[in-house]
Image (tube, rainbow, N blue to C red):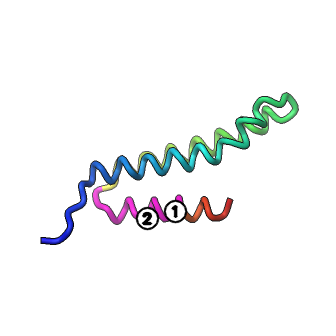
């Protein structure tokens, strides 16, 4: 028998990675949101990020195998490399 991966735990790990990536994207906007002249634009950008990660959360929750979770983790890693 090969290695058995607990899908529930793998989803939890993927959610943790998603939350960390989301926080990293929010960080610069959190500061801009406190500057009156930049607050509206910052909130609009934050809304886009919230939608992106909400969709990702849905994908993680719907994943039926580890391959789907690996795809999400790879996308997160690629996204972080480009920031």
Q: Locate residue 17 relative to residue 33 in the image: left or right.
A: left
Say whether marks 1 and 2 touch (CB < 8 Å): yes
**Which residue does the numbered mark 2 point to in the structure image?**
71
**Which residue does the numbered mark 1 point to in the structure image?**
75
Q: Is residue 79 above or below residue 52?
A: below
User: Outermost residue, left direction?
Assistant: 1
Quadrant for the N terminus in the image:
bottom left
Q: Separation of disc 1 and disc 2 at Cα?
A: 6 Å
How far across and how far down the image is residue 31, in percent?
75, 36
For the residue pair 51 and 75, the one nearer the viewer reads as 75
Residue 20 bears which disc, if any? none
For the residue pair 56 and 8, the one nearer the viewer reads as 8
Q: Disc count in the image?
A: 2
Name which residue lies at 71% across and 36% down.
30
Q: In the structure shown, which secondary structural element does the residue marked by tag 2 occupy?
A: helix
Name which residue lies at 50% across and 43% down.
54
Q: Residues within 10 Å of mark 2 (few under 14, many from 20)?
A: few
Residue 26: quadrant of the picture: top right
Q: In the structure shown, which secondary structural element does the residue marked by tag 1 occupy?
A: helix
How far across and how far down the image is residue 83, in percent?
68, 59
User: Outermost residue, right direction?
Assistant: 37
How far across and how far down the image is residue 50, in percent?
58, 41
SS majority, magenta:
helix
Q: Locate residue 65 relative to residue 54 in the image: left or right.
A: left
**What stretch of residues is rendered in magenta?**
64-76
Q: Residues within 10 Å of mark 1 (few under 14, many from 20)?
A: few
Name which residue lies at 78% across and 36% down.
32
How far across and how far down the image is residue 7, in percent?
27, 54
For the residue pair 66 and 16, the one nearer the viewer reads as 16
Q: Is residue 11 magenta?
A: no
Q: Is residue 69 magenta?
A: yes
Residue 47: quadrant of the picture: top right
């Amino acid at each position: 028998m090969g290695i058995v991966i607990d899908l529930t735990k793998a989803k939890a790990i993927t959610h943790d990675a998603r939350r960390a990536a989301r926080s990293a994207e929010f960080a610069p906007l959190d500061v801009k949101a406190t500057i009156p002249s930049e607050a509206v634009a910052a909130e609009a950008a934050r809304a886009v990020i919230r939608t992106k990660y909400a969709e990702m959360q849905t994908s993680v929750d719907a994943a039926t195998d580890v391959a789907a979770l690996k795809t999400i983790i790879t996308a997160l890693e690629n996204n972080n490399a480009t920031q």
